[in-house]
Image (cartoon, grey):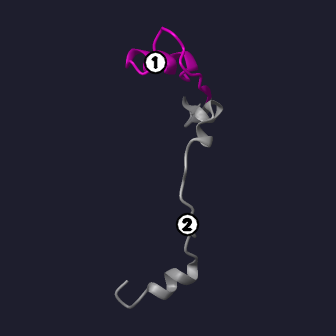
């Protein structure tokens, strides 16, 4: 039998990750299938505007040519 969203939310409530009280922020969530009989909860914090507050350095991902250039007979 597949686990439900209620089961998953009950689990994180029991662990103390969420609980009753004043709401300081809202996070949306949804479930995606995990295997044949389970779901995985996905929490979307981007609705809080968190993406506007974070900075991630950009970098160039090396291509296959870079990898081949660094290989030698002992790689």
* Mark 1: few/some/many CA within 10 Å (<14, 14-19, 20+): few
Foreground residue, 64 or 37? 64
Which residue corresponds to mark 2? Answer: 59
Residues at marks 2 and 1 touching, judged by CB atoms closer than 8 Å: no
Which residue does the image show at 55% across and 66% down from the upper left? 59
Q: Residue furthest top?
A: 21
Which residue does the image show at 51% across and 18% down from the upper left? 9
Q: Count of labels shown?
A: 2
Foreground residue, 59 or 29? 59
- Note whether 72 is above or below 43 in the view shown: below
Is-magenta flag for residue 29? Answer: yes
Of marks 2 and 1, which one's residue comes earlier in the chain?
1
Quarter of the image where one finds residue 70: bottom left
Quarter of the image where one finds residue 31: top right
- Note whether 61 is above or below 21 in the view shown: below
For discs 2 and 1, the disc positioned in front in the rendered view: 2
Quarter of the C terminus within the rendering: bottom left
For the residues marked 2 and 1, what is the alpha-carbon distance in whole angstroms? Answer: 36 Å
Relative image position of residue 23 (x, y in whole percent): 54, 14
Is-magenta flag for residue 7? Answer: yes
First to last magenta residue range: 1-30
Relative image position of residue 10 (x, y in whole percent): 47, 15
Mark 1 falls on what kind of element? loop
Foreground residue, 26 or 2? 26
Relative image position of residue 62 (x, y in whole percent): 55, 74
Quarter of the N terminus within the rendering: top right
Mark 2 falls on what kind of element? loop
Which residue does the image show at 38% across and 91% down from the upper left? 73
Foreground residue, 15 or 19? 19
Which residue corresponds to mark 1? Answer: 18
Which residue does the image show at 61% across and 30% down from the upper left? 48
* Mark 2: few/some/many CA within 10 Å (<14, 14-19, 20+): few
């Amino acid at each position: 039998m597949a686990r439900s969203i209620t089961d998953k939310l009950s689990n994180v409530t029991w662990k103390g990750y969420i609980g009753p009280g004043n709401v300081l922020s809202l996070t949306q969530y949804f479930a995606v299938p995990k295997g044949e009989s389970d779901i995985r909860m996905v929490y979307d914090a981007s609705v809080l505007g968190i993406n506007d507050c974070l900075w991630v350095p950009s970098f160039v991902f090396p291509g296959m040519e870079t990898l081949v250039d660094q290989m030698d007979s002992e790689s």
